Structures are given as C-alpha cells and as structure tokens.
Image (cartoon, grey):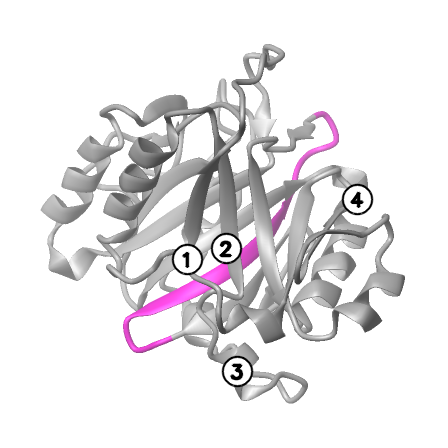
Amino acid sequence: MDPKAGSGEEDDCVDSGAETGGSDYSHMSSTSSELSVEEAQDPFLVSVHIIADPGESRPLQEAIDKVLAWIHPDLQLFRVSERRASRRRRKAPKVAQPALAVVLFLQEEYGEEQILQLHRTLQRPPWRHHHTERVPSRFLPYLPCSQEFFTLAPGTPLWAIRPVHYGKEIVRFTIYCRHDNYADILKFYELILRRSPSQRKTDFCIFPIFSSLDVDIQFSLKRLPCDQTPVPTDSSVLEFRVKDIGELVPLLPNPCRPISEGRWQTEDHDGNKILLQHSILSTRATH
C-alpha cells in the first residue's frame, strides 16, 4: 500500500479487502471439523492489546469502544493498558506502512448518514488522519473518491471504514506482509488459528474467526509489493486464544516465552509480536 498515491482501481486489497466486504465469503461459518464448539463460537479468539503512554489509556479505550459500538456494543476486542514510562520513539518514515489495520464494514441499508457520522468521529481527537488513498468511486459513492486511514497513536493499528452492500457487518483485522514472507506467514497463522482461509488469492486471504446473525469477525493477510516494507506496530500486540500451547510451542519458527500465567509471546516471520493465551484461562479473562 502506497500512502502517497493509491495503486489503481483494480488493486483489491490495498484497502484490506474493499471488494470482499459483504461478499459470498462473509457468511461462511467459522466452524471446522478440527475445531471445538468453544473455538468456533469464540468472538474473542483474536483481540488486540494496545500499550499507551502514562495517562493516555482511558481516552484511547473510550475512543475505540465508541467506534466498535457502531457495530455491536459488546465487541470489546481491544484492551488498552499503560506502560510505566513514556517512550522516546524513533521517527518513522513518512510513508511507513503499519503492519496492522482494522477495517469496519458497515451496512448501507441503515442509511449513508451512519457511515458519514462515524467518518466524522474518526476525524476528531484522539483520532488522527494517517493517509489517504484513491479507490474506485463505485465503492464509496457518497464519499470522496478516496479512502482515508486513521490511527490513535504511534505504533497502533490503522483504521478504516467501508460500506457493506449486502451481508453482515464485519470487523476485519489485517496484517500486511513482506512480499517474500507471505507464504510462510500464511502457514504460521494457519497453525495458530487451527483453520484454513475461507478466501485465498496469491496476495490476500481471509480467515473466518466468528460469525453471528449480525456480525462477522475476520482475520486477513495482505501481501505487499516487493518495494514496500510493513512496520510492526510496536505499541499494539495481536492476542490469540490457543488450546494446546504445549504442543504448539515446538512448532513455532521463533522463540516463544511465557510472560505471565497462561500467556506466551512470540513473533511471526515479519517480526510482528503476538501473544498466545491458553484457552483454559480464557473463560475467566475479561476484555
């Protein structure tokens, strides 16, 4: 994804999958013959832990909860905590591509005003505009012919909103991958999630995570061109609930170490840190 100049109208996943929102893929069940009922019905199988500077966690948590409430008030998929001291950050390149994005697909049938109102919310603090891309106007007929991406703080995910022409509303987590690492990263997350993608292309795939009558939660991977390098979001960590942590650890490509009771930390091939939460403890976890 090139923040300076979109990549043309036919680049379907520069936008984390604009052309797949509300598609036939979105209603596929998250069940699998290898998954337990608990795994298949767990809306918090994938979540995001954000680490804020001292004094900033509450406004960031409230901002995220307010946005997610547009889809469902109980979707507490993000947990914000604070580090002990503020960090001095290296200045990222102006066109740096954060490796993690969150895309919300909203139903058009409720009226375009809903999407416009949420768009206005993302234009106010603590939200910050990150960059704008050109997209096909047929996807956003009542918005400018561009896609705006927003963020809350350095090192946290990109956010974007999309209309859904039909089907359910969707929360989609997307990891942008280095071109040469995409195949290995795909195998890595198949191992973590214990399922295969429901949609798969040479440069994009979608894993169904949870499906209800109203909303789908998805996890996707997007392969970037050779000349683009994603930057890990160093203040955000994806967390996955896993069943057999003891069997999983020896299969991982990078070291995996315990950081607290029931939680382990490792990273994928691009250096994105992830947390693995033992699912026995997950029933007591709060979000």
Neighbourhood count class around disc 2 (C-alpha, 10 Å): few under 14, some 14–19, many 20 upward: many
Pointers 1 and 2 in contact (CB under 8 A)? yes
- Numbered badge on residue 38: 3
Does residue 213 belong to the magenta stretch? yes
Q: Is residue 46 among what the camera can see?
A: yes
The N terminus sits in image quarter? top right
Residue drawn where x is 47% and y is 79% of the image:
41
Residue 223's spot in the image, x, y percent? 67, 43
Say which amino acid is labelled 4: His
Instruction: Tell me if residue 176 comes above or below residue 17 in the rendering.
Output: above
**Which type of secondary structure does the marked residue at label 1 adopt?**
loop
Instruction: Tell me if residue 193 comes above or below residue 92 in the rendering.
Output: below
Q: How far apart are the alpha carbons under marks 4 and 1? A: 28 Å
Instruction: Tell me if residue 175 comes above or below residue 110 in the rendering.
Output: above
Residue for badge 1: 287
Residue for badge 4: 269
Say which amino acid is labelled 2: Ser
Extent of the magenta region: 212-227
Residue drawn where x is 75% and y is 39% of the image:
270
Residue 25's spot in the image, x, y percent? 47, 69
- Lower position in the chain sequence, tag 4 or tag 1: 4
